[in-house]
Amino acid sequence: MSPPNDAQAPFLAALEAHRGILVSVAAGYCRDRAEREDVVQSIVTELWHAYPRYDGRVRFSTWMYRIAVNTAISHFRRARRYDGTIGVDPQHFDTLAAPPDTGGDERRAALDELLASLDELQRALVVLYLDGNSYAEIADVLGISETNVATKLARIKERLRKEHAHGTR
């Protein structure tokens, strides 16, 4: 079921206001530009089909994240293009969210390597975290507790520190 035509303008305005979500979620699951574009298109399609059921009980961005992450995970499961992993310095984990002023390509490559080493839930946690969402917002999007978010992120960081210290992956 698609929304009525009079819903198109508010949908497009909300989509434009939160388009960064589309970009960051797609980038978190796809390295290839064409594949990211396909994922963004799939997310927009899923959002449009789900829009009639959006009731405003949660912020539009939270609702959008839920659909975007689930759509990206589904795409990732179908594609499964990542078969190897490469070490990533854990210090990048907390700094990759900041806009790069120099060396942006290196930072993007480090983020891609990090994300490729994670399972779907871990990947969603990191993407949401790097987008600047609070633990409460991440918990709401993923349907887990804030404590669980904090614990899982701490474990990811610790794993990265250990792997980096040992120089293995």
Image (cartoon, rainbow, N blue to C red):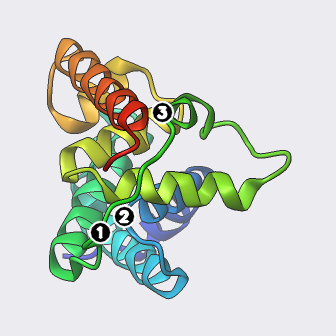
Q: Which residue is mark 1?
A: 84
Q: Earlier in the sequence, mark 3 or mark 2?
A: 2
Q: Is 137 left or right of 99, judged from the image as shown? A: left
Spatial distance from mark 3 to mark 1, Cα to Cα? 18 Å
Mark 1 surroundings within 10 Å by alpha-carbon count, few (fewer than 14), some (14 through 19), many (20 or more): few
For the N terminus, which image quadrant? bottom left
Tag 1: amino acid? Gly
CB within 8 Å, label 1 to label 2: no
Q: Nearer the viewer, residue 14 or 147?
A: 147
**Residue 2 spot, x, y in % from top left:** 27, 76
Residue at image point 28% right, 31% down: 159
Q: Earlier in the sequence, mark 3 or mark 1?
A: 1
Q: Secondary structure at mark 1?
A: loop
Mark 3 surroundings within 10 Å by alpha-carbon count, few (fewer than 14), some (14 through 19), many (20 or more): many
Does residue 14 appear in this view?
A: no
**Residue 138 spot, x, y in % from top left:** 32, 30
Q: Nearer the viewer, residue 132 or 16?
A: 132
Tag 2: amino acid? Tyr
Q: Secondary structure at mark 2?
A: helix
Q: Which residue is mark 2?
A: 29
Q: Which residue is mark 3?
A: 90
Residue at image point 36% right, 69% down: 43
Q: Is 46 left or right of 145, judged from the image as shown? A: right
Q: Nearer the viewer, residue 161 or 23?
A: 161
Spatial distance from mark 3 to mark 2, Cα to Cα? 19 Å
Q: Is 96 left or right of 88, judged from the image as shown? A: right
Mark 2 surroundings within 10 Å by alpha-carbon count, few (fewer than 14), some (14 through 19), many (20 or more): many
- Total labels drawn: 3
CB within 8 Å, label 3 to label 1: no
Work out whether 148 lies above or below 17.
above
Q: Secondary structure at mark 3?
A: loop
